[in-house]
Image (cartoon, rainbow, N blue to C red):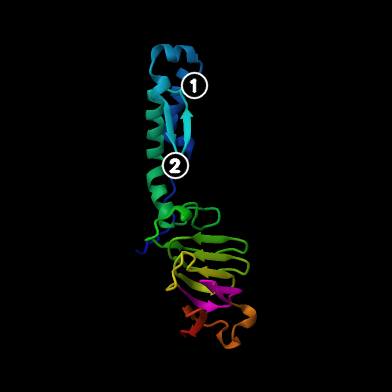
Amino acid sequence: MAKTTTTATEAIAPLSMRPAWRALQGHHERVGEVHLRDLFARDRTRGERLTADGAGLFLDYSKNRITAETLALLVALAEESGLKEHTEAMFRGDRINVSENRSVLHVALRMPKDESLIVDGNVRSGQTIMHPQGDVTIIGRVASGAEIVAGGSVHIYGALQGRVIAGISGSRSARIFCTEARAELLCIGGAYVTAENTNSEMEGRALEARLDGDELKLRILS
Protein backbone atom coordinates (compact mmCIF):
# COMPACT_ATOMS: atom_id res chain seq x y z
CA MET A 1 0.00 0.00 0.00
CA ALA A 2 1.67 3.20 -1.16
CA LYS A 3 2.08 6.16 1.13
CA THR A 4 1.53 9.76 0.15
CA THR A 5 3.92 12.63 0.73
CA THR A 6 3.36 16.31 1.31
CA THR A 7 5.44 19.35 2.06
CA ALA A 8 6.79 20.21 5.50
CA THR A 9 4.36 21.11 8.24
CA GLU A 10 3.57 24.76 8.78
CA ALA A 11 5.69 26.82 11.16
CA ILE A 12 4.32 27.48 14.63
CA ALA A 13 5.01 30.23 17.14
CA PRO A 14 8.37 30.14 18.97
CA LEU A 15 8.26 28.08 22.16
CA SER A 16 8.55 31.03 24.53
CA MET A 17 5.54 32.72 22.90
CA ARG A 18 3.12 29.82 23.29
CA PRO A 19 0.44 30.18 26.02
CA ALA A 20 1.02 26.60 27.19
CA TRP A 21 4.71 27.33 27.73
CA ARG A 22 3.94 30.44 29.75
CA ALA A 23 1.51 28.39 31.84
CA LEU A 24 4.30 25.89 32.51
CA GLN A 25 6.63 28.70 33.55
CA GLY A 26 4.07 29.94 36.06
CA HIS A 27 3.58 26.40 37.35
CA HIS A 28 7.35 25.99 37.79
CA GLU A 29 7.47 29.09 39.93
CA ARG A 30 4.87 27.55 42.23
CA VAL A 31 6.36 24.05 42.56
CA GLY A 32 10.04 24.66 41.89
CA GLU A 33 10.97 24.93 45.56
CA VAL A 34 8.52 22.36 46.95
CA HIS A 35 10.30 19.53 48.77
CA LEU A 36 9.74 15.99 47.48
CA ARG A 37 8.91 14.95 51.05
CA ASP A 38 5.92 17.27 50.94
CA LEU A 39 4.79 15.97 47.55
CA PHE A 40 4.81 12.38 48.82
CA ALA A 41 3.01 13.43 51.97
CA ARG A 42 0.23 15.03 49.92
CA ASP A 43 -0.06 12.13 47.48
CA ARG A 44 0.71 8.69 48.95
CA THR A 45 0.14 6.97 45.58
CA ARG A 46 2.58 9.01 43.49
CA GLY A 47 5.25 6.31 43.79
CA GLU A 48 2.92 3.93 41.98
CA ARG A 49 1.14 6.38 39.73
CA LEU A 50 4.08 8.36 38.32
CA THR A 51 5.79 5.41 36.64
CA ALA A 52 5.88 3.80 33.22
CA ASP A 53 7.25 0.54 31.86
CA GLY A 54 7.71 -1.02 28.47
CA ALA A 55 10.21 -2.97 26.35
CA GLY A 56 11.86 -4.26 29.53
CA LEU A 57 12.46 -0.78 30.93
CA PHE A 58 10.93 0.75 34.06
CA LEU A 59 10.78 4.53 34.53
CA ASP A 60 10.07 6.05 37.93
CA TYR A 61 9.62 9.80 37.66
CA SER A 62 7.82 10.23 40.99
CA LYS A 63 11.01 11.57 42.58
CA ASN A 64 10.83 14.75 40.53
CA ARG A 65 8.86 17.90 41.18
CA ILE A 66 5.98 16.69 39.02
CA THR A 67 2.28 16.78 39.84
CA ALA A 68 -0.91 15.94 38.01
CA GLU A 69 -1.05 19.60 36.96
CA THR A 70 2.49 19.35 35.54
CA LEU A 71 1.47 16.42 33.33
CA ALA A 72 -1.68 18.19 32.14
CA LEU A 73 0.33 21.29 31.24
CA LEU A 74 2.93 19.21 29.35
CA VAL A 75 0.19 17.50 27.36
CA ALA A 76 -1.29 20.92 26.57
CA LEU A 77 2.12 22.13 25.34
CA ALA A 78 2.49 19.04 23.13
CA GLU A 79 -0.93 19.66 21.60
CA GLU A 80 -0.25 23.35 21.09
CA SER A 81 3.11 22.52 19.48
CA GLY A 82 1.47 20.17 16.98
CA LEU A 83 3.20 17.02 18.23
CA LYS A 84 0.53 14.71 16.80
CA GLU A 85 0.59 16.42 13.41
CA HIS A 86 4.41 16.40 13.29
CA THR A 87 4.48 12.70 14.24
CA GLU A 88 2.09 11.89 11.41
CA ALA A 89 4.19 14.02 9.04
CA MET A 90 7.31 12.07 10.04
CA PHE A 91 5.64 8.75 9.26
CA ARG A 92 4.33 10.11 5.93
CA GLY A 93 7.82 11.14 4.86
CA ASP A 94 7.18 14.89 4.86
CA ARG A 95 10.24 17.15 4.79
CA ILE A 96 10.21 18.03 8.48
CA ASN A 97 14.00 18.40 8.64
CA VAL A 98 13.79 22.10 7.80
CA SER A 99 17.54 22.76 7.98
CA GLU A 100 18.21 20.27 5.14
CA ASN A 101 14.73 20.34 3.56
CA ARG A 102 14.33 16.56 3.62
CA SER A 103 12.47 13.74 5.30
CA VAL A 104 13.68 12.17 8.52
CA LEU A 105 13.87 8.39 8.47
CA HIS A 106 14.01 7.32 12.12
CA VAL A 107 10.85 5.25 11.66
CA ALA A 108 11.93 3.27 8.59
CA LEU A 109 13.12 0.16 10.45
CA ARG A 110 9.79 -0.09 12.30
CA MET A 111 7.48 0.46 9.36
CA PRO A 112 4.87 -2.23 8.59
CA LYS A 113 5.93 -4.46 5.71
CA ASP A 114 2.80 -3.62 3.70
CA GLU A 115 3.74 0.07 3.58
CA SER A 116 6.22 1.74 1.24
CA LEU A 117 8.91 4.08 2.48
CA ILE A 118 8.85 7.27 0.41
CA VAL A 119 11.77 9.69 0.58
CA ASP A 120 10.91 13.05 -0.97
CA GLY A 121 14.38 14.43 -1.61
CA ASN A 122 17.94 13.58 -2.57
CA VAL A 123 19.98 10.90 -0.79
CA ARG A 124 23.47 12.16 0.03
CA SER A 125 26.78 10.34 -0.29
CA GLY A 126 27.39 8.21 2.80
CA GLN A 127 23.68 8.02 3.65
CA THR A 128 21.88 4.66 3.86
CA ILE A 129 18.11 4.32 3.45
CA MET A 130 16.76 0.98 4.69
CA HIS A 131 13.28 -0.58 4.84
CA PRO A 132 13.90 -4.32 5.44
CA GLN A 133 10.30 -5.44 4.95
CA GLY A 134 8.89 -3.31 2.13
CA ASP A 135 9.38 -1.16 -0.96
CA VAL A 136 11.39 2.06 -1.09
CA THR A 137 10.67 5.00 -3.37
CA ILE A 138 13.13 7.87 -3.76
CA ILE A 139 11.87 11.08 -5.35
CA GLY A 140 15.24 12.60 -6.06
CA ARG A 141 18.87 11.75 -6.79
CA VAL A 142 20.84 8.96 -5.10
CA ALA A 143 24.41 10.21 -4.95
CA SER A 144 27.56 8.16 -5.41
CA GLY A 145 28.41 6.54 -2.09
CA ALA A 146 24.77 6.40 -0.97
CA GLU A 147 22.97 3.11 -0.43
CA ILE A 148 19.31 2.05 -0.69
CA VAL A 149 18.32 -1.27 0.93
CA ALA A 150 14.80 -2.69 0.67
CA GLY A 151 12.97 -5.88 1.50
CA GLY A 152 10.91 -5.40 -1.65
CA SER A 153 11.33 -3.29 -4.77
CA VAL A 154 13.10 0.06 -5.18
CA HIS A 155 11.85 2.94 -7.35
CA ILE A 156 14.13 5.93 -7.97
CA TYR A 157 12.74 8.98 -9.74
CA GLY A 158 16.05 10.67 -10.37
CA ALA A 159 19.68 9.88 -11.15
CA LEU A 160 20.93 6.70 -9.48
CA GLN A 161 24.66 6.99 -8.86
CA GLY A 162 24.95 4.97 -5.65
CA ARG A 163 24.13 1.38 -4.64
CA VAL A 164 20.75 -0.37 -4.52
CA ILE A 165 20.09 -3.72 -2.83
CA ALA A 166 16.51 -4.98 -3.20
CA GLY A 167 14.64 -8.08 -2.07
CA ILE A 168 16.56 -8.64 1.18
CA SER A 169 13.38 -10.10 2.74
CA GLY A 170 13.74 -13.03 0.34
CA SER A 171 11.37 -11.67 -2.28
CA ARG A 172 12.52 -12.95 -5.67
CA SER A 173 9.89 -10.80 -7.38
CA ALA A 174 11.58 -7.60 -6.17
CA ARG A 175 12.67 -5.18 -8.88
CA ILE A 176 14.72 -2.03 -9.21
CA PHE A 177 13.53 0.88 -11.33
CA CYS A 178 15.34 4.15 -11.97
CA THR A 179 14.92 7.00 -14.42
CA GLU A 180 18.64 7.63 -14.93
CA ALA A 181 21.03 4.74 -14.32
CA ARG A 182 24.63 5.44 -13.33
CA ALA A 183 24.67 2.94 -10.46
CA GLU A 184 27.73 1.70 -8.61
CA LEU A 185 25.85 -1.50 -7.72
CA LEU A 186 22.48 -3.13 -8.44
CA CYS A 187 21.68 -6.26 -6.43
CA ILE A 188 18.64 -8.52 -5.97
CA GLY A 189 18.74 -11.84 -4.12
CA GLY A 190 22.53 -12.04 -4.16
CA ALA A 191 22.80 -11.51 -7.93
CA TYR A 192 24.40 -8.20 -8.83
CA VAL A 193 25.97 -6.00 -11.45
CA THR A 194 28.43 -3.16 -10.93
CA ALA A 195 29.29 -0.07 -12.91
CA GLU A 196 32.31 -1.93 -14.34
CA ASN A 197 30.30 -4.77 -15.88
CA THR A 198 27.22 -2.82 -16.99
CA ASN A 199 26.74 -2.25 -20.73
CA SER A 200 27.76 1.33 -21.51
CA GLU A 201 24.61 1.71 -23.65
CA MET A 202 22.56 1.57 -20.43
CA GLU A 203 24.36 4.45 -18.73
CA GLY A 204 22.05 7.39 -18.14
CA ARG A 205 18.99 5.47 -19.32
CA ALA A 206 15.79 4.52 -17.50
CA LEU A 207 16.24 0.91 -16.39
CA GLU A 208 14.51 -2.02 -14.78
CA ALA A 209 16.50 -4.72 -12.95
CA ARG A 210 14.92 -8.08 -12.06
CA LEU A 211 15.88 -11.66 -11.34
CA ASP A 212 15.75 -14.25 -14.12
CA GLY A 213 16.58 -17.51 -12.39
CA ASP A 214 19.76 -16.75 -10.49
CA GLU A 215 20.88 -13.99 -12.87
CA LEU A 216 20.16 -10.28 -12.68
CA LYS A 217 18.69 -8.98 -15.91
CA LEU A 218 18.64 -5.30 -16.95
CA ARG A 219 16.14 -3.82 -19.34
CA ILE A 220 16.16 -0.33 -20.87
CA LEU A 221 12.80 1.34 -20.40
CA SER A 222 13.46 4.52 -22.35
Q: Residue 93 is drawn in which quadrant?
A: bottom left
Image location (x, y in percent) of residue 167: 47, 68
Q: In the image, is residue 34 above or below residue 198? A: above
Q: Which residue carries the number 2 mark?
A: 13
Q: In the image, is residue 41 above or below residue 138? A: above
Residue 63, numbered label: 1
Q: Secondary structure at mark 2?
A: loop
Q: Which residues are magenta?
A: 175-192
Q: Secondary structure at mark 1?
A: loop
Residue beneath the point at 43% across and 36% down? 18
Q: Residue 196 is drawn in which quadrant?
A: bottom right
Q: In the image, is residue 94 above or below residue 146? A: above
Closer to us: mark 2 or mark 1? 1
Residue beneath the point at 57% across and 65% down? 147
Image location (x, y in percent) of residue 111: 42, 55
Q: If you read the primary sequence from the N terminus, does the residue marked by circle 2 or circle 1 appear first?
A: 2
Residue beneath the point at 43% across and 33% down? 53
Residue beneath the point at 44% across and 29% down? 22
Q: Give, as a three-letter code, the residue at label 1.
A: Lys
